[in-house]
Each structure stands twice: as C-alpha cells, then as structure tokens.
C-alpha cells in the first residue's frame, strides 16, 4: 500500500494510490471498506474509521472500480468527511472548507505550463482533487512571467512550446525559485532530451499520454522535496537569527562587509577589538563570533569594565581567595577561570584602570592568572574579545591606555557603522523588532503605517540600533489597534517632521513629455532613496514583487 500525507499537522488528508490490497481486513474496515479474504478491497460504505480522528475531520478516501473478479482496478481521488463518532458522513470529489485553518499547512502551489490548454486543465483538475493549489499558464512566456512574480513549490512544464520552451523554463525556475522542483512533460521524448533535462536540475521527466496516477505520485514527491528544502532553510534561518551571523541583522553594503569579516574571524583564536558607537551592537557581534567559533560549546562570559571600581574589577576578572580583602569570606572564581576554554568579552575596555591593564597584559602574554591575595598561578585558555566606543589611539596619546595592551587586543579589528551610516537597514530592523516584541508582549500587530515608517526612516538615531529597538518596543506596547502609526511614536519622534515633499504639480510638470521609461526609472530611484536603499521596502511601497523590482533595477542600472 502506498500512502501520502499532507495538509493537517496532526489530522492528515490521506491519499491512497492504486492498486491497493490490504494485509488486514480490520485495517480496511476502519476506513469504511469491505474486503475479500485476500485483502482486496471490494466495497466502500458508511462505517467507522480510525478512532484517533477527533473533532470534525477530513481524510481523503477513495471510490473504487473493480474488474471482473471483483478486485480493485482503479482508485479515484474522493474525500470522506466524518464526525466525532468516527462515522463517515459524506463523500465528495473535493474537500469541504476547513474549520481549523490555523493548523492546516498551506497547500502545495503548482504551476502548470502547457500551450495545449485542454491538456493543462486536465492536469490541473487531476492535481486539484488530491489537494494541490494549481495555476495554469498556456504559453511559455506567461509561465516565465508567473515564475518571476509568484512562488511555487512545483512547476510542471511541457518541453516543446513555441515561444519559451521547457528547458528555458527550467533554467528560469532554478534561477528565480531555487527551492522549487520542475517536472518536464513531452510527447516527443528522446534519451538525449531526458539526459539534458536531468542534468539541468529537472526533478522528473514524464511522457505523454500521462498516467495521472504517476503524475500525482511524482508531483507529491516533488512537493515534499520542495517543502523539506524550504523547511531546512527556514530552520537554518531561525537558528542563525538566534545564534549565528544572521543574528547580526542587516542588508546594507556596510553590514555585508561586517558579516563577511566576521565569517573569516570566527573560526580562529585571534583576539578581536570591536569598535563602534554606543548602541551599535558590539556585544551581539561578540556573541556571533563566539557562537560560530570552535569554542561555541564552552562559556561566553561578558564583563563591563566601566561599571566596576578598580579593586572589584580585578576580583571579577581574576577571582580572589578567602581573606584577600574585607568581606572576602570565601574563595571566588573569576571570569577568566569561569570562561576557561571559551570566550571572555571585555566591554568598554577603554575605561579599564591602568593597574588592571598591566595585569591583563600579563595574562595575555603568559596564559596565567593569579587570584587576588594568592601567589599560585592558574593556567587558563580563553579567547579575548573586547569592545570600546572610545578612540584608543587618542587614549594612548593621552597616557590613559597602554599601547602594548592595545596591540595585544587588536590582532583583528571590527568597526561597526552607526545606524545613520546604514540607514538602508532600518526597515528590516524595524520588521524584526516588531515581530519580536509583538510575541513578547502578546500583541497582534498587522504592520507599520507608511507615515510612521517614513518618520523612522527620516530620524537621525543618535542612540543607534539600541534606540531604534527601544522605540519599536514602546510603539508595540502602547498600540491599541494593531497598526503601528504616528500616534504610537514616543515623544522623541512624535515631534519630528517627515521629509519635505515637492508639490505634485511642480514635480509632475517636469515629467510631462518624457518617455515612460524615464518616468519609471525616476520613480523607482526616488522610492529606493526614501526606503533608504532597502529593496524589499521599496517593492512594498511600489506595490510590485521583489523580483520585478530587482529586474527593473538591473535594467535601469540603478
């Protein structure tokens, strides 16, 4: 028996492909069937089915034709519905609307491309019956356009078409929708064409006239592959967002450079000095370096050097023994010992007292610490990451920071740009923070109104990402209607003015008589400027798909 599952997370739709022979008569009966002694299905009717199905449930059953011997000859895709008592109550050729859409996995999206419209419709109807959401394109050109504008799990395309053939569709699909699968069908199959298709990444190659049962089986397998690939990508994205380099969020060129540098730095044991203004995310970068290093299974320990006095800072770093100073009633392990084998992050290292700098330098040179009040050295193996918002070269010139320690700490330097310098990242940061704080505060947030988005884009952000984060959290907390708008902005932004816009008359007069291509190019360029260079946000503002916008940017060389 061949069984395929998709649809509900725990109450599946069941599609059983023919021919079917049951090894257990009771198994057949619990799906509302009668079978002969050898397990062959003979009759379907109203009877109990699997008892674990509760609340109104749907399962894809089947009606069966039999041959002269009464054996199952063909299975049609039909849908049984049942009540809480597990009794089949209805059979139809399509499922009734779900009563619990929140738990239903989206139907696999299938694009069927064939210049024979009647054949394309037959394929679509066959797949519709077993739970696929089908879209039909009756030419290669139309199919290519849909591939650019929509996302599909499976693309079924004829090989021979007049304008854009199946191999070109395959190439475009692999470029635009790398997670999708492509099935080629043809009535003129040859071994060389099949080999070429498979070499270029086709999932399968079917010959006309199609065996619809085979088509359904192949399409289902292709959809499962596509969904599995998408799930893996999503899981990796979530893990990376929480622990990896993608936790350092940004799409601007400046942040791409930072992330590429981090990828090269992380696998090493080199000391790293992270420089940047307050609120730019220096500790987040340090965590990303640790999490992507060979030390990721060992402790990551952070210490703010500016928050402690000299004596307490030394005790925190190196530990102390009982009686080393007043109130030292027991021995204490310091941060170096606690982080042994892992990473120690020294924040605001530029504010470290000079006496502590000398002791830190000795640790970096010898790999040994001595607890306060003790004479016994302790070996440690710790990677040092440090951060500062000060110019350490100026501090060296002023005599407040040791040059030898500076060079020990800055084997590699990472400089983080201010939010003003990476304003293209504001939309993606805002979206990330909205999702995070909506979940934290159990709020239903539909989105961000354009006026509020423009205010956020126009603001100078002296506090950088930390300030943006706090502003978005404040907006989510005070919102009452599910749409973040200017009335939700905190006082620091509520009085700020939106960018001055030209009057429509003045701006439009200058465009009269110019080619439409020039006007389109100008509008796209201006929208990108308002969106801070963020293409996703610009596409949303223009009301077009991202792929369409990317193609226009390339076409107009923006």
Image (cartoon, helix red, strand yellow):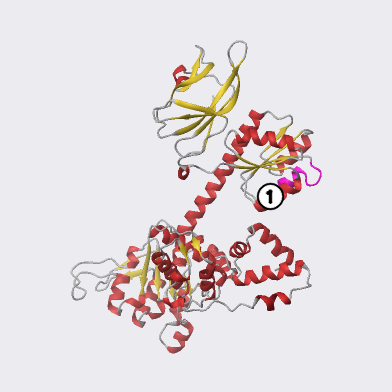
The residues colored magenta run 161-172
Q: Is residue 127 above or below residue 341?
A: above
x, y percentage for residue 116? 76, 37
Answer left or right for 266 relative to 307.
right
Q: Is residue 486 magenta?
A: no
* Residue that lies at the very extreme toward the front in this rendered image: 505
Judge by depth and name the residue closer to the eye, 54 or 236: 54
168 within the magenta span: yes
- From the top left corner, tell me how far across and down residue 372 is, in percent: 26, 73
According to the picture, the residue beneath numbered tag 1 turns out to be 146
Whether residue 266 is visible: no
The image shows residue 255 at horizontal and vertical percentages of 55, 68
- The one nearer the camera, 303 or 8, is 8
User: In the picture shown, does residue 47 fall above or below 98?
Assistant: above
Question: In the figure, is residue 120 to the left or right of 357?
Answer: right
For image coordinates 66% across by 75% down, the residue present is 504
Query: Which quarter of the image is occupied by the C terminus?
Result: bottom right
- Assign a secondary structure to mark 1: helix
Q: Quadrant of residue 550?
A: bottom right
Q: Residues within 10 Å of mark 1 (few under 14, many from 20)?
A: some
């Amino acid at each position: 028996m061949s069984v395929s599952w998709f649809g509900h997370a725990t109450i599946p739709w069941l599609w059983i492909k023919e021919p079917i022979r049951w090894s257990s008569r009771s198994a057949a009966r619990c799906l509302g069937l009668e079978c002969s002694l050898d397990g062959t299905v003979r009759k379907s009717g109203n009877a109990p089915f699997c008892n674990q199905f509760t609340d109104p449930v749907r399962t894809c059953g089947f009606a069966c034709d039999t041959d002269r011997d009464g054996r199952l000859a063909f299975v049609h895709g039909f849908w049984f519905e049942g009540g809480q008592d597990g009794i089949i109550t209805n059979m139809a050729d399509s499922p009734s609307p779900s009563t619990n859409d929140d738990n239903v996995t989206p139907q696999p999206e299938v694009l069927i491309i064939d210049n024979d419209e009647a054949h394309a419709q037959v394929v679509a109807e066959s797949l519709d019956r077993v739970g696929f959401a089908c879209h039909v394109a009756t030419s290669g050109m139309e199919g290519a356009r849909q591939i650019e504008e929509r996302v599909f799990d499976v693309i079924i395309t004829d090989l021979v078409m007049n304008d854009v053939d199946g191999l070109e569709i395959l190439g475009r699909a692999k470029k635009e929708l790398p997670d999708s699968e492509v099935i080629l069908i043809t009535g003129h199959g040859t071994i060389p064409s099949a080999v070429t298709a498979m070499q270029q990444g086709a999932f399968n190659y079917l010959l006309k006239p199609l065996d619809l049962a085979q088509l359904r089986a192949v399409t289902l397998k292709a959809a499962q592959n596509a969904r599995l690939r998408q799930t893996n990508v999503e899981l990796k994205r979530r893990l990376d967002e929480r622990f990896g380099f993608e936790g350092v969020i940004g799409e601007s060129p400046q942040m791409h450079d930072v992330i590429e540098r981090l990828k090269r730095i992380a696998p090493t044991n080199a000391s790293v000095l992270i420089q940047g203004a307050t609120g730019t995310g220096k500790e987040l970068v340090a965590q990303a370096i640790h999490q992507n290093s060979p030390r990721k299974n060992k402790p990551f320990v952070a210490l703010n050097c500016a928050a402690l006095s000299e004596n307490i800072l030394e005790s925190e770093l190196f530990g102390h023994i009982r009686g080393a100073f007043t109130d030292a009633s027991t021995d204490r392990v310091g941060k170096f010992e606690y982080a042994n084998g892992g990473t120690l992050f020294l924040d605001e290292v530029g504010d470290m007292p000079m006496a502590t700098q000398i002791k830190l330098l000795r640790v970096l040179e010898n790999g040994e610490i001595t607890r306060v009040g003790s004479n016994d050295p302790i070996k440690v193996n710790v990677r040092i990451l440090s951060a500062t918002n000060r110019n350490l070269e100026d501090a060296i010139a002023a005599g407040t920071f040791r040059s030898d320690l500076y060079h020990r700490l800055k084997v590699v330097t990472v400089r983080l740009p201010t939010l003003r310098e990476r304003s293209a990242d504001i939309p993606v940061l805002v979206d990330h923070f909205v999702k995070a704080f909506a979940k934290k505060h159990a709020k239903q947030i539909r989105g961000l109104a354009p006026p509020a988005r423009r205010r956020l884009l126009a603001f100078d952000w002296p506090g950088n990402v930390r300030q943006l984060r706090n502003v978005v959290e404040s907006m989510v907390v005070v919102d009452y209607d599910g749409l973040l708008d200017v009335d939700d902005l905190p006082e620091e932004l509520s009085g700020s003015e939106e960018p001055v816009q030209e009057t429509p008359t003045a701006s439009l007069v200058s465009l009269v008589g110019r080619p439409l291509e020039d006007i389109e190019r100008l509008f796209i360029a201006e929208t990108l400027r308002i969106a801070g260079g963020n293409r996703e946000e610009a596409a949303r503002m223009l009301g077009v798909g991202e792929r369409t916008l990317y193609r226009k940017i390339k076409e107009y060389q923006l």
